[in-house]
Image: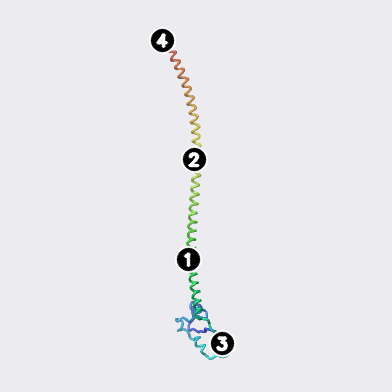
Amino acid sequence: MFGFNMFAKELTGEEIAELSKDGLCTDIPERLERYRRIRWEDIILLPRRGNVQNIRRGCDEAYISDKRSLEISVEKAQAELQKVQDHLNNALREIQELKANRQTNERENAETNAELQKTKLKLNETETKLEEARLKLNETELELERTKEELNVIVVELEKVNLASNDCRDP
């Protein structure tokens, strides 16, 4: 048995945790002293019977220093973990933003592709109409060329008729 104490009140979970945090080296917090009814310091002063041995509890300065070093290391590790957690949370936020942007871009891309398809269809229709107009223009040019040739033939014949008519009038 070691460190046996009885308190005049029911201790909270937090108080019990505080009493056990340093193991055998835990001192009773000042605020709990007024509730202690049976004290370990009083028990060890009582007469002993049977096989009772004193043991060192190992709470020297080296132990306390090592413990404090470990606590500092744990605190540093916790601070570093918090930084990593914050960094990961920021990265997660950025990933979510990128996903949202990607979805927006994919939607806009799909809309643009649909518009592009409509434009391609209109272009094909326009190219078809243009080709039809080009063919009609070629036909019209050919017809115009034939008409021109026919007119030249008529002009030549009219000139002949005109010359013949002038020859008949001149005595």
Name the amino acid type tagged 3.
Gln
The residue closer to the viewer here, 39 or 118, is 39
> Considering only order in the chain, which callout, 3 or 1, is on the residue closer to the N terminus?
3
Q: Residue at x 47, y 62 (%)?
A: 90
Mark nearest the camera among 4 and 3 is: 3
Name the amino acid type tagged 4.
Asp
Q: Disc 4 designates what residue?
A: 170
Q: Disc 1 designates what residue?
A: 83
Distance in Å between CA atoms under marks 4 and 3: 170 Å
> Considering only order in the chain, which callout, 2 or 3, is on the residue closer to the N terminus?
3
Q: Residue at x 53, y 91 (%)?
A: 47
Name the amino acid type tagged 2.
Leu
Q: Quadrant of the N terminus?
A: bottom right
Distance in Å between CA atoms under marks 4 and 1: 122 Å
> Considering only order in the chain, which callout, 1 or 2, is on the residue closer to the N terminus?
1
Distance in Å between CA atoms under marks 1 and 3: 50 Å
Q: Residue at x 48, y 25 (%)?
A: 145
**Is 171 left or right of 66, judged from the image as shown?**
left
Categorize mark 4 by other alpha carbons within 10 Å: few (<14), some (14-19), many (20+): few
Q: Disc 3 designates what residue?
A: 53
Mark nearest the camera among 4 and 1 is: 1
